Image: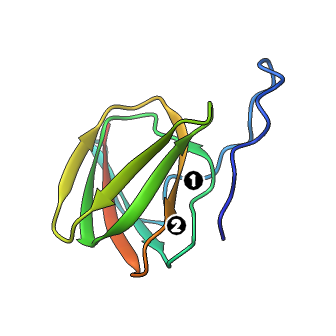
């Protein structure tokens, strides 16, 4: 399922945001760990990270991040790769490759 960002013509309207991943697999007072799985062509809903986070690619894929303001960022994530990202940006992730993407996203509370 590939989604496109909502129309941003009305800047005062708050978009409906989805979850960061499909399932929380661990949580305590310091971290929350999400499971993410995207089949080729599948995308996450528009969402926002409220905390800094790490993405660990269990099975890498060719992904694209699209921000609510329309920016498109190539995000190739190789198997075993780890990236750190700051919180705040409203965006979605789409697997544009031909392999299944599996990741653990670790939010730092």
Q: Secondary structure at mark 2?
A: loop
* Residue that numbered label 2 is attached to: 22
Q: Secondary structure at mark 1?
A: loop
Q: Position of residue 59 (x, y in %)?
A: 28, 76
Q: Is residue 45 left or right of residue 96?
A: right
Q: Position of residue 49 (x, y in %)?
A: 46, 39
Within 10 Å of the Cα at label 1, are there few (<14), some (14-19), or many (20+) other Cα atoms? some
In front here: 27 or 79?
79
Q: What residue sits 62% from the left and 30% below the top?
A: 69
Q: Is residue 10 left or right of residue 101?
A: right
* Residue placed furthest toward the top: 12
Q: Position of residue 73 (x, y in %)?
A: 43, 44
Q: Which mark is residue 19?
A: 1
Q: Position of residue 47 (x, y in %)?
A: 57, 45
Quarter assignment of residue 30: top left
Task: Work out which quarter of the rendered image holds the C terminus and state it.
Answer: top left
Q: How many marks?
A: 2
Q: Is residue 50 above or below residue 36?
A: above
Task: Quote the CA–CA distance across marks 2 and 1.
Answer: 7 Å
Q: What residue sits 35% from the left and 53% below the top?
A: 75
In front here: 18 or 94?
94
Marks 2 and 1 in Cβ contact (< 8 Å): yes
Q: Which mark is residue 44?
A: none
Q: Is residue 77 above or below residue 99?
A: above
Q: What residue sits 77% from the left and 19% below the top?
A: 11
Within 10 Å of the Cα at label 2, are there few (<14), some (14-19), or many (20+) other Cα atoms? few
Q: What residue sits 76% from the left and 29% below the top?
A: 8
Quarter assignment of residue 82: bottom left
């Amino acid at each position: 399922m590939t989604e496109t960002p909502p129309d941003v013509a009305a800047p005062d309207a708050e978009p409906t945001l989805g979850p960061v991943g499909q399932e929380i697999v661990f949580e305590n007072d310091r971290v929350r760990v999400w499971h993410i799985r995207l089949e080729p062509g599948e995308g996450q809903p528009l969402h926002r990270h409220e905390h800094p986070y790490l993405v660990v690619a269990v099975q890498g894929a060719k992904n694209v991040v699209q921000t609510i303001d329309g920016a498109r960022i190539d995000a190739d994530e190789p198997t075993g790769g780890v990236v750190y990202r700051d919180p705040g940006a409203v965006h979605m992730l789409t697997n544009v490759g031909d392999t299944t993407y599996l990741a653990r996203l670790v939010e730092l509370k």
